[in-house]
Image (cartoon, helix red, strand yellow):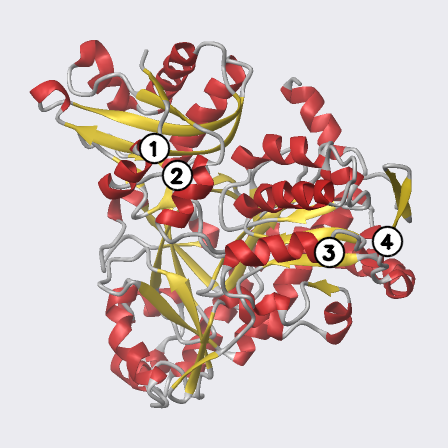
Amino acid sequence: MNDASAKESEATPPPPPVSDRQCNGGRLVRVPGGSITGKATGPAMLMAARVRTSTLDQITRDPARVQAIQEETLLTHCRRGADTEFGRQHGLGRVRSVQDYRQAVPLRPYAEFEPWLERMRRGERNILHPEFIEYYGCSSGTSDTAAKNKYLPVSREQIGWQQKAGFDIAARYVQMTGDVAFTGGFVLYLFPPAVIRKEGPVGISSNPGLMLLHLPRVSRMISLPKPPLRDIENYDRKLDAIADTYLSHDVRVMSGTTCWFSNLFDRLLMAARRRGMNAKTVSDIWPNLRVLFGGGVHAEPYREIIAQRVGRKIPIIDNYNATEGGIFAVSDRLDDPGMAMIPDRAVYFEFVPREQHGRSDGRRYALWEVEAGVEYSVVVTTCSGLYAYYMGDFIRFTSVYPHRIEFTGRASGVLSITQELVTFLEIERAVRHALKETDSAAVEFSCGAEIGISDSAKGRYQLFIEFENTPADLQAFAQAFDGELCRQNRVYREHRQSDVAILAPQVVALPSGAMRKFVERIGRNGPQQKFPHIVDDAKRDVLRGLGSVAASP
C-alpha cells in the first residue's frame, strides 16, 4: 500500500458497532461494555470534545495567549513554593517574571534533585512542595544518576491535571473522526499494576498505575482489566490472562505503551484459536475496536504491524507523556505523526538547544520563543515541586502557532562511533525507508555499535531486526538502511565515505519470537518499559546470541 492510500485508509471512520460475530458456525456472545453509559455520554462527549479542542486550537494559535497562560502557570508554581526550603534558597517569592526565574533557578537533572526527594520520601515536609506528597511515580532512569530508577513526586493536584489532559486525548480523536461509539464498550488499559507499595510514609507506584486508581467512577465501570487481573505483576502472565479473560468482551478502545499492542494481539489470536475460533485477525474477535491511545514510544514503526494484526488500518492517537508532569502533547491529525502541545495543564515548559543539554546555564527558551526545525532538550516546572528540571528528552518543533512537535530521542539514546550522534529517530526513519524499499515488514528492531572491526579502530552499526515479512534480498535492505542514514546525518555520511571511519552496517535478521525473548532476558518485559531501539554492548551481545542471518551492503 502506498503512503497516500495508507493515509486515506487510516482516516476512514471505523466500522459501525456489531453485537456478535460468527466463529466456526457458532455465535460468540459478546460481554457488553457501556452500552447504556454510551448512549447517555456519547452526545455529551461529542459536544465537550468540540468545545475543548476549539478552545485549545484558539489558544495555541495566539502567541499572546500562549505566553499569558505559561507565565501564569510558572508564577503560580513559584508562589506555591516560595516558603519551602527550595523556595527560600532560590528566592521564589521574589520571582515576578520569566527572566527573574531564569536568574534565580538553574537547570538541574534528576541526580541533583535526588537528595531533596529522598528526604521527602522519608516524610519531611516543605522541602520542594508545601504539602505532604503522598505518591511517588517510579520511572526508568534516563538521567545522569546512579539510581536505577527515578522516584518522582506526583501531587494530588497533578493527578487532577493529568485526568484533564487524558480527556484531551479522547477529545482529539472525537474531534477528528466524530466517532463517539467507543463510549459504548470497554476500554482496555495495558498499564502496570495499580498497586501502591508502601515505603515509610509514602506510596510508590507507576504513574499509569496511579491514574488507574484515580479513574472517575463512570470510567471505572467500563475499564479493563479488573482486579485482581489488573494487578498481576508478571507482565508476560498478565498479557496471557487478559487475552484469555477478555476474548468475548466488547473492547472498543485500548490504551497503553504502543509497542505492547501487537504483543497482546498475538496472544489474543492464539487464545481464540485454542477455543476453536477461525480468527484470522483481531477484528474477527473484537470487531468494535475503534482506536488505540498510545504513548511512551514513537508510533510510526508499529503502524503497519498493528494494521496487519487488526486486519485494517486503525487510528493510533499518540501522546507525549511523562511521570514528571503528565501529558504534554497529543496527536491532532490522523495523517501526521506530529503532536500538538498542550500549554494549559499546569506544566511550565522551557527548551534548551540540544547541544547545550545538561548545562546548568544552558540557553533557555519559553514555549513562545522556540523556532521550528530546531531540536531542544525539554525542561519542566510542575505543580509537584520540580523546578527547571531536565527530563532527558529531546523534541523538535515541526511548527509554531500551533506548536507541534515530534519526539526525537533521549539523552541516553544516541549511537556514536566518531561523534556522529545518530538519534533513534534517524535510525527509525532509516528502518522504515529500508522496509518500504524492499517491500517487507518488521515486528521490532534494535541497533547497536560495534567497535574494532578486523583489528582496526573502525566501527559499524549492527541492526537487529525481527521481520514479519522478510525481504527477498537482505543485502538490499542493508544498503537502503545505510543510504538513508547517510542522507539524514552529515557526520555519518562523511565518515562512511570510502569507509574512512565507519564501515557499512550489518543487518542481522532474527528468528520469529526473538524480540520477545530479548526483552525478557534484559528485564524489560513490563508495560511501562520502552523497547530499546538503541542498545549498549551488553544488550547487543544478547541480541547477537539470538541472530540467524546477517548481511552488509
Task: Please report contact status of discs 2 and 4: CB closer than 8 Å, yes or no.
Answer: no
Q: Which residue is drawn at 26% across and 16% down?
A: 504
User: Circle 4 sits in a helix, a strand or a loop, which is it?
Assistant: loop
Q: Nearer the viewer, residue 299 or 450?
A: 450
Image check: 40 left or right of 295? Answer: right
Q: Residues within 10 Å of mark 1 (few under 14, many from 20)?
A: many
Q: Distance between the residues labelled 3 and 2?
A: 31 Å
Q: Residues within 10 Å of mark 2 (few under 14, many from 20)?
A: many
Residue for badge 1: 447
Q: Looking at the image, is mark 3 or mark 2 nearer the viewer?
A: 3
Residue 479 lies, with reference to residue 41, above or below; the image says above
Q: Please, what is the three-letter code of the amino acid marked with disc 3?
A: Tyr
Image check: 262 left or right of 126? Answer: right
**Residue 402 shows in the view:** no
Residue for badge 2: 533
Residue 166 is situated, as x and y percent measured from the top left of the image, at: 64, 61
Q: Looking at the image, is mark 2 or mark 4 nearer the viewer?
A: 4
Residue for badge 4: 30
Q: Distance between the residues labelled 3 and 1?
A: 35 Å
Residue 99 position by quadrant: bottom left
User: Circle 3 sits in a helix, a strand or a loop, which is it?
Assistant: loop
Q: Looking at the image, is mark 3 or mark 1 nearer the viewer?
A: 3
Residue 333 position by quadrant: top right
Q: How crowded is mark 4: few (under 14 residues within 10 Å), some or many (20 or more)?
A: some
Q: Which residue is drawn at 43% across and 36% down?
A: 514
Q: Which residue is drawn at 32% across and 25% down?
A: 489
Residue for badge 3: 246
